[in-house]
Image: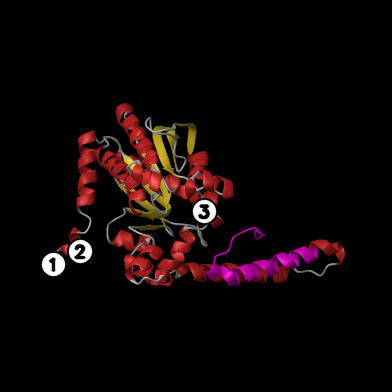
Amino acid sequence: MSNPTRTYLDFERPIAELDAKIEELQSVSEKNGEDAPDVADEVAKLRQKSVEQLKQLYAKLDPWRKTMVARHPERPHLKDYLSSLITDFEELSGDRRFGEDHAIVGGLGRFRGRAVVVMGHEKGHDTQTRLKHNFGMARPEGYRKAVRLMDLADKFGLPVLTFVDTAGAYPGVGAEERGQSEAIARSTERCLTLGTPLISVITGEGGSGGAVALASANTVLMLEHSIYSVISPEGCASILWRDGAKARDAAVAMKITAQDLIQLKIIDGIIPEPVGGAHRDREGTIKAVGDAVEASLSSLEGLDAATLRKKRRERFLAIGRTLMEPAG
């Protein structure tokens, strides 16, 4: 049975209409009881048609539509991953300088038996929580908290897992006054100097330095319909063409999808999503992410701190080199 409260994206309108028809037929059947006509066959046909159309739509998503899917409000968020993948989670708060930033949530826990430090961006799931978490846009104290957590991981030899989902760091006046760019740079630096394995997953949006500050990892994974870019398509369109309506063109030009980035060797792996996106099977998506993270962690087991830092350094220095080398 389809979910009547599901949020449909603009390009999913045909699917929404089919699902509404299914709901209507089932509602009429339930209301009339034994006197209702048998609609089981018709419902089955409509459901099959809906599934087929969904497959067709998602088989040929362009970068702009993938951006819409990456921003879908019902995609699993950090707290969903924490509740399903991390046991004995103990949240740590504050940057020991200014205060707490709820846009980045992190702490200690166990991932499938391993003690880990885990952190990431939390966007919130309704108006109240979105305001509390500032829509996942972190302030300087959030990135300084991240540095504090990585220091803790280094001290006790714990792997670090990060889940990235942000439109970017918060650009407010207060954030700039408290050293936003410096805090982002320090967090990025701490990622690169960490002496334990660091695995990062882009679960939705990976926006600019606000994402890189948690994603300068040994292994960077992306969900199939997530995006990772230096600026949003709307921002790029406004700068290049002074027209935010050209965001679709910008999304194509910037190569922001997981499929583009794996070819450019900016990321290391793509985690498949269910047909119709992560929001249509949240549990399945979270399990797939957990399996991918576990495999990545296993591949780094036994490496000493110097080797991990060297591999991380080489990984980032290699980005773009193959594009610059002359053919032949």
- Residue on which the image places disc 1: 326
- Residue on which the image places disc 2: 323
- Residue on which the image places disc 3: 75
Q: Nearer the viewer, mark 3 or mark 1?
A: 3
Image coordinates of residue 121 in percent, x first then y, are 44, 45
Which kind of residue does numbered mark 3 sit on?
A: Arg
Q: Is 164 left or right of 20, judged from the image as shown?
A: left
Q: How is the image coloured?
A: secondary structure
Q: Nearer the viewer, residue 282 or 247?
A: 247
Name the disc covering residue 31, or none. Answer: none
Element type at mark 2: helix
Which residue, as the protein is rendered here, is positioned at the far top? Answer: 156
Indicate yes or no whether the magenta region holds residue 21: yes
Vertical placement of residue 296 versus 237, above or below: above
Element type at mark 1: loop
Which kind of residue does numbered mark 2 sit on?
A: Leu
Q: CA distance from mark 3 to mark 1?
A: 41 Å
Q: Which residues are magenta?
A: 1-29
Residues packed near mark 2 inside 10 Å, few (<14), some (14 to 19) or many (20 plus)? few
Can you see residue 198? yes
